[in-house]
Amino acid sequence: MTTSQANNPIGPGYEGVAGSEKRFRDIFRDTLRAEMLRDEDVFLMGEDISGGFDKDTKEPLDAWGGPFAATKGLVQEFGVERIRDAPISEAGFVGAAVGSALTGMRPVVDLMYFDFVTVAFDQLLSNAAKSRYMFGGQTKVPLTLFARSGAGTGHAAQHSESFYSMLAHIPGLKVVVPSDPYSVKGLLAAAIRDDDPVFVVNDKKLINLTGFVPDEEYVIELGKGRYMRRGTDVTLVGMSYTTVVCQKAADQLAEIGIDAEVVDMMSLSPFDEDILIESVTKTHNVVIVDEDTPRASMSSEFAAIIADKAFDHLDAPVKRVTAPHTPVPYNRDLEQEFMPQPGDVVGTVKNLLGRE
Amino acid sequence: MDISKEKLEWIYTTMYRIRRFEETMLEQTLKGNSMGVAHTSDGQEAPPTGICAHLTDKDWIGSTHRGHGHCISKGLETDKMMAEVFGKATGQCGGKGGSMHIADFSKGMLGANAIVGASIPLAVGAALTAKLKGIESESVGVSFFGDGASSQGVLHESMNLASVWKLPVIFACENNGYAEATPSWYAVSAEDIASRAEGYGMPGVVVDGMDVFAVYDAAGEAIARARAGEGPTFLELKTYRYHGHFHADDTSKYRKPEEEAYYKNLDSIKHFERTVLKQKLMTEKKLKSIRDSIEQEMLHAVEFALNSPMPDISTLYDDVYVNYSNPILGLR
Ligand SMILES: Cc1ncc(C[n+]2csc(CCOP(=O)(O)OP(=O)(O)O)c2C)c(N)n1
Ligand SMILES: [Mg+2]
């Protein structure tokens, strides 16, 4: 399958492709495994990824299958050297991963919750992202990191962030945001094979969702978006879980005769300017949906690019549906209010198109 | 024994309150009445109780994701704690923090903290305030953290700072043997975490964290040192959590039944009861009346939390700043 076919899992290209319904977390794990089999320089590190050890035999227990069961069974297959359980020292082991990437390995780091990236932020910003540039291109940092973002699970302010915009802001880092089992397979494989540091941000709300996944091996080119649904009246731009929100909103809009197109960005840095411009040129209206807070965010970045490069095609201002400029609250109702909901998108589209 | 009758009663009340709060909260969480994850600290009652027995509202503590015992030892009310876990408007933080973020600044409680290690320097900062204001004798900082947190760089930076600046800090490491499923023998490169103290120029003491009298004595010395302006102390309290890492965790996947039985046999509450009865310091009647009143308190806490209103949706936008000129609303 070519990348362009893979880019359109709901359209042509998919007919006749062998595959099955898979859970996001299962295909994530299977992809990690496939990449470790493919390249013996790939190894994993993170807290609890071998899930405890027997006191007497010192053998790994894999009690949790790793955080969110992302590494279940891997320590039995690959051993404790390549499935390297780390103490709670994010700055230390992310830094060590950078050092090992600089010297020929291809480390993959499980940071558990996305919020913990800040503990290791200096290593990402000052070392992972800058080494190649400031050393005049002598070296490269083939490092992959992954973690779980997003609100909606009652984890409160310090375990629910979606601030991937902070990473996308950093020259030298790449950021991808899968939105379903299909995209996580292709993006994770691409991230691990890429020679630059790539952060794979998985929203927690996706982890137990299922979707069609082709059996064959494929990668999704970093920096490419895809159409989840074609339409003519308005473009809904999603990323990570908000792609699901956009699809639900599009279904509701269809019921009232509004034909929405849904673009899934998949990559945040680099990102697909062309798909944004192509879609807006056709629909003339756009709503960007993001669970990240709105200041200096991906939604503001996409809005700026559309305003700059597709201004003449717009019938109305670029609209954004985002989380508010607040931390994530604990209470369930407040948390739901915090998150962009399909109804918010529908309301915004109706206002935008002057429909009541 | 060099503990007043009132203090003994306070210790028993506090330990039993922690035990029953955790058991009750876990039960309520499994029933679906909590809105999120809950980490219980039953089994670990002795460290917060034995330490906070020496503190007043003017002393400050920093806490962890497993913070209910710290909160209770510092005098927080169980009604408001339960309501916070239930996400209610009457909760300690108005339902915005939840189990992992209970704080009460009026009681010297700097907040439970869900980033492992993150609260350690806060207690150092509280001690710095005391030093700057010249009130070390009445205001010390105690930082509670786990064996897992001892691997965070911020602990090491904080210990060095506290020592260099000679601050009135107690580093209280509750070593319950595990960080999630990972045993401390795997993740910590020292037999005793307290041995780290030497390199940072402070006393490091290993304490039996299942024996509240041992904790009380060791903490008394450390806190007296801090109040006297002699600087920080590191206490490693060897203890055990009875339940899983969080409410849905199954410990049988990584802990042996013999090990669990061993620690349950050392139970700090049972140990206290045996000791005070044997030494005739308290009567069985008194112990029972304390237990009975705690049972009532727990029934009340659940009742209070269940019947409390949800926070108003508009509170989502409150308290991000003291002062901010732009609207804080989401873009919708
Ligand atoms: C910076 C950071 N890394 C990882 C986690 C995930 N996590 C939460 S609790 C925990 C284990 C903490 O172990 P310990 O310090 O021993 O405390 P205990 O849970 O035993 O009370 C981990 C890894 C976190 N919350 N914050
Ligand atoms: Mg522990």
Image (spheres, coloured by chain):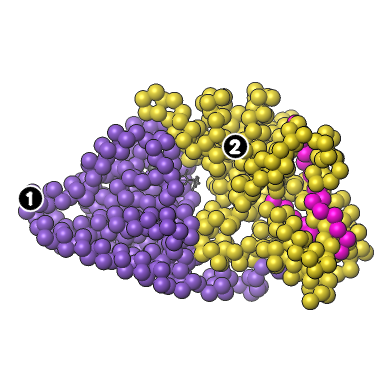
**Alpha-carbon neighbours of circle 2 within 10 Å: few (<14), some, or many (≥20)?**
many
Q: Residue A123, percent across and down?
A: 60, 41
Q: Residue at x 65, y 73 (%)?
A: B327
Q: Nearer the viewer, residue A178 or B324?
A: A178
Query: Mark 1 — on which chain does it sit?
Result: B
Majority secondary structure of magenta residues = loop
Q: Residue at x 44, y 25 (%)?
A: A59
Q: Is residue B109 magenta?
A: no
Q: Nearer the viewer, residue B110 or B197?
A: B110
Q: Quadrant of residue B313?
A: bottom right
Indicate the colour of chain A.
yellow
Q: Which residue is mark 1?
A: B279
In the rendered view, does A271 fall on the left or right side of A87?
right
Indicate the colour of chain B.
purple
> Are the residues flagged by discs 2 and 1 in contact, CB closer than 8 Å?
no
Q: Is mark 1 within 8 Å of ligand 1?
A: no
Q: Residue at x 63, y 30 (%)?
A: A33
In the rendered view, does B46 fall on the left or right side of A274?
left
Q: Quadrant of residue A15?
A: top right
- Residue A199, numbered circle: none
Q: Residue B264, percent across and down?
A: 26, 42
Label 1 SS = loop
Q: Quadrant of ligand 1?
A: top left
- Magenta segment boundaries in residue numbering: A217-240
Label 2 SS = strand
In what quadrant of the picture does the C terminus of chain B appear? bottom right
Residue kind at label 2, given as amino acid type: Val
Q: Is residue A224 magenta?
A: yes
Q: Quadrant of residue B84?
A: bottom left
- Residue A109, numbered circle: 2
Question: Is any atom of residue A11 visible in this view?
Answer: yes
